[in-house]
């Protein structure tokens, strides 16, 4: 991913941070943003151009699993990357 971005400066990455439903929606939006920023910083440390990376948070809004167990809540705590 980072190598592709370094090779093709026109590639843009959109990172979205997600959380489980533990806590309030407002706090989860902040945690999602922190998760996305952490991945952005990691990608930058590997050489991806910072100007080509956008971050956002969806908080608890888009779960990929029901929040009914520790294992499923762990699946919902993630970051996704879309290359554009």
Image (spheres, rainbow, N blue to C red):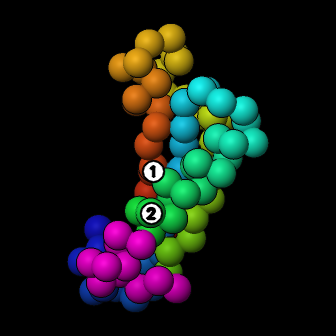
Residue placed at 51% from the left, 65% from the top? 37
Residue placed at 37% from the left, 79% from the top? 44
For the stretch drawn in magenta, what is the main secondary structure? Answer: helix
Q: Which residue is mark 1?
A: 80
Q: Give the class, few, some or many, for how many residues have Cα within 10 Å of label 1's Cα (few <14, many ≥20).
A: some
Residue placed at 50% from the left, 11% from the top? 68
Give residue 51's position: percent from left, percent from top: 52, 85
Q: CA distance from mark 2 to mark 1?
A: 12 Å
Q: Which residue is mark 2?
A: 38
| Magenta region | 41-51
- As drawn, 57 above or below 77: below
Give residue 57's position: percent from left, percent from top: 63, 52
> 27 or 10: which is nearer to us?
27
Q: Circle 2 sits in a helix, a strand or a loop, which is it?
A: helix
Q: Is residue 45 left or right of residue 38?
A: left
Residue placed at 44% from the left, 43% from the top? 78
Magenta segment: does it hold 12?
no
- Looking at the image, can residue 82 be seen? no
């Amino acid at each position: 991913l980072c190598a592709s971005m370094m090779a093709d400066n026109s590639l843009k990455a959109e990172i979205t941070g997600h959380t489980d439903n533990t806590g309030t929606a407002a706090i989860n939006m902040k945690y999602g943003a922190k998760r996305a920023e952490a991945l952005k910083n990691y990608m930058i440390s590997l050489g991806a151009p910072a100007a080509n990376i956008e971050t956002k948070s969806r908080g608890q809004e888009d779960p990929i699993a029901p929040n009914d167990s520790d294992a499923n809540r762990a699946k919902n705590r993630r970051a996704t990357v879309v290359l554009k």
